[in-house]
């Protein structure tokens, strides 16, 4: 779009803003697969939240911003007794979902975790439901599908990481659109709110990479959903929008932050992303390393008694993994470790598994881990990169082979698709259920634990459950 910079005439809004707004306010989701996957995603996200509650670094961030700033009849935070305004509630829920890097994933030109948007969806849904507006779990699933779609389709061909911006910008955009619509906003109001989401710019990606890696990457999504709810509420109180927030010459997002390029929409908005989303089923590991962890677990029996004899370990991976998680030198905190492919491979070679606790300082003090890291070679396998980018495959392949001082070696173990991939969804479902039941057992006891364990078994009953009753079941 071009516009005379000297003219104060208000232009028509950017087409992308309109396209997203019309989708979120008018599209009817018909896909049964998308709704079933959304149900699994909600179950899995709640499991991630319960696991995160075991970590003080996370729980210290929860609750009101200042002591006593609670809202009776407001948003509940699962696994706690907090009742908060929906803006603060979104931060709490979003931070819990994302904390352990164990929730669902989307890999494309830009990657991310679409269930991060649950921070806004559950916070607004519970608030509305408690204020007397009928909102059911089925509505939550539909909003999840739409938030996944907005975030994921924008990520297909637009690499924000390539200009130094973090992917949580897409969480803020998707959550803003959905939250505004949930709160009763019109198509125009969604356009206006979206313009504010883009005007906010983007968080710098530096907190995900050496030498600055830190726990902000675990609460950044909560921050994004919180901001989204705030922007939605402001627009619904009458705040104006900015029609060419993206395309305005010099001052718009494209010129300021995207090197003058326009966004490409890889496909029309529907339900594609939810249908193809990736679950982290067995291991809380950055997704590019999931299959490397699976390889290491398979090799553990051949290596566990020969750790001191290892001379070299070769990890073949995709270009994205080399660029994002190939990391040498000292690892300073859990956020450093869960984004290091060498660390995530060494631990299961030693222990036969990888858990969130393995990233903590106590476990990381095991000298064998760094000893193995120093013997690792991370190399790009060009075919893995091709298959990673192929829209028909979207594989996330890794191969691992261990060599010993006496000249012997293990087999070369290759895994093309992680357990949470759509191509292995049948294998993943019972494991997702087991992950969920274990997680709630860490927080709840007795009848409450039993009710929660059975909550997702009856799809029809779950779909019709009012959100306020659903959220009440999670109060600790």
Image: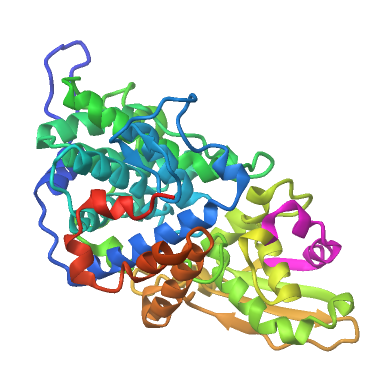
Residues 104 and 467: in front is 467
- Above or below: residue 253 compared with residue 414: above
Q: Residue 158, percent across and down?
A: 37, 48
- Above or below: residue 12 compared with residue 44: above
Name the magenta segment's main secondary structure.
helix
From where the camera sits, is residue 143 visible? no
Q: Residue 108, percent across and down?
A: 40, 58
Q: Residue 354, percent across and down?
A: 64, 68
In the picture, measured across the screen, residue 455 lies left or right of residue 138, that is right
Tally of numbered discs:
0
In the picture, measured across the screen, residue 147 lies left or right of residue 295, that is left
Dividing the picture into quadrants, the one containing residue 215 is: top right
Residues 120 and 419: in front is 120
Q: Residue 384, percent across and down?
A: 52, 72
- Above or below: residue 389 compared with residue 306: above
Magenta extent: 358-378
Dividing the picture into quadrants, the one containing residue 194 is: top left
In the picture, measured across the screen, residue 275 lies left or right of residue 435, that is left
Residue extending farthest front = 446
Quadrant into which the N terminus falls: top left
- Above or below: residue 146 compared with residue 420: above
Q: Is residue 228 magenta?
A: no
What residue is shown at x 29% (from left), y 61% (from top)?
273
Dividing the picture into quadrants, the one containing residue 452 is: bottom left
**Colour mapping:** rainbow
What residue is shown at x 20% (from left), y 36% (from top)?
180
From where the camera sits, is residue 206 visible? yes
In the picture, measured across the screen, residue 127 lies left or right of residue 211, that is left
């Amino acid at each position: 779009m071009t516009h005379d910079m000297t003219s104060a005439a208000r232009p028509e809004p950017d087409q992308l803003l309109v396209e997203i707004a019309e989708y979120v306010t008018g599209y009817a989701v018909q896909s049964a697969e998308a709704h079933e996957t959304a149900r699994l995603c909600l179950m899995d996200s709640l499991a991630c939240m319960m696991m995160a509650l075991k970590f003080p670094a996370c729980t210290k961030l929860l609750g009101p911003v200042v002591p006593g700033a609670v809202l009776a009849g407001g948003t509940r935070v699962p696994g706690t007794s907090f009742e908060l305004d929906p803006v603060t509630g979104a931060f709490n829920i979003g931070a819990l979902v994302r904390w352990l890097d164990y929730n669902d994933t989307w890999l494309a030109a830009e990657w991310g975790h679409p269930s991060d948007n649950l921070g806004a969806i559950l916070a607004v849904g519970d608030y509305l439901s408690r204020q007397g507006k009928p909102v059911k779990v089925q509505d939550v699933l539909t909003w999840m599908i739409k938030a996944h779609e907005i975030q994921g389709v924008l990520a297909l061909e637009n690499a924000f990481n390539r200009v130094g911006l973090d992917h949580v910008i897409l969480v803020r955009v998707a959550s803003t659109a959905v939250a505004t619509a949930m709160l009763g906003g019109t198509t125009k109001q969604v356009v206006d709110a979206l313009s504010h989401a883009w005007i906010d710019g983007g968080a710098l990606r530096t907190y995900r990479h050496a030498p600055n890696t830190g726990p902000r990457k675990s609460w950044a999504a909560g921050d994004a959903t919180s901001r989204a709810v705030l922007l939605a509420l402001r627009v619904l109180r009458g705040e104006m929008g900015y029609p060419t927030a993206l395309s305005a010459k010099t001052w718009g997002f494209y010129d300021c932050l995207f090197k003058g390029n326009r966004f490409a929409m890889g496909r029309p908005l529907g339900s594609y992303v939810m249908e193809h989303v990736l679950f982290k089923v067995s291991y809380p590991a950055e997704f590019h390393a999931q299959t490397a962890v699976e390889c290491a677990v398979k090799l553990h029996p051949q290596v566990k008694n020969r750790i001191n004899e290892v001379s070299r370990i070769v990890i073949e991976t995709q270009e994205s993994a080399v660029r994002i998680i190939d990391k040498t030198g000292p690892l300073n905190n859990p956020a450093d470790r869960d984004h290091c492919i060498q660390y995530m491979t060494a631990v299961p070679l030693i222990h036969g598994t990888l858990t969130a606790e393995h990233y903590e300082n106590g476990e990381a003090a095991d000298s064998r881990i760094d000893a193995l890291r120093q013997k690792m070679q991370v190399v790009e396998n060009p075919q893995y990169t091709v298959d990673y980018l192929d829209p028909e495959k979207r594989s996330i392949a890794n191969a691992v082979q261990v060599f010993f001082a006496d000249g012997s070696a293990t087999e070369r173990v290759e895994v093309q698709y992680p357990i949470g991939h759509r191509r292995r969804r049948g294998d993943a479902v019972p494991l997702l259920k087991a992950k969920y039941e274990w997680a709630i057992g860490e927080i709840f006891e007795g009848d409450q634990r039993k009710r929660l364990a059975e909550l997702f078994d009856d799809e029809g009953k779950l779909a019709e459950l009012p959100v306020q009753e659903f959220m009440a079941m999670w109060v600790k």
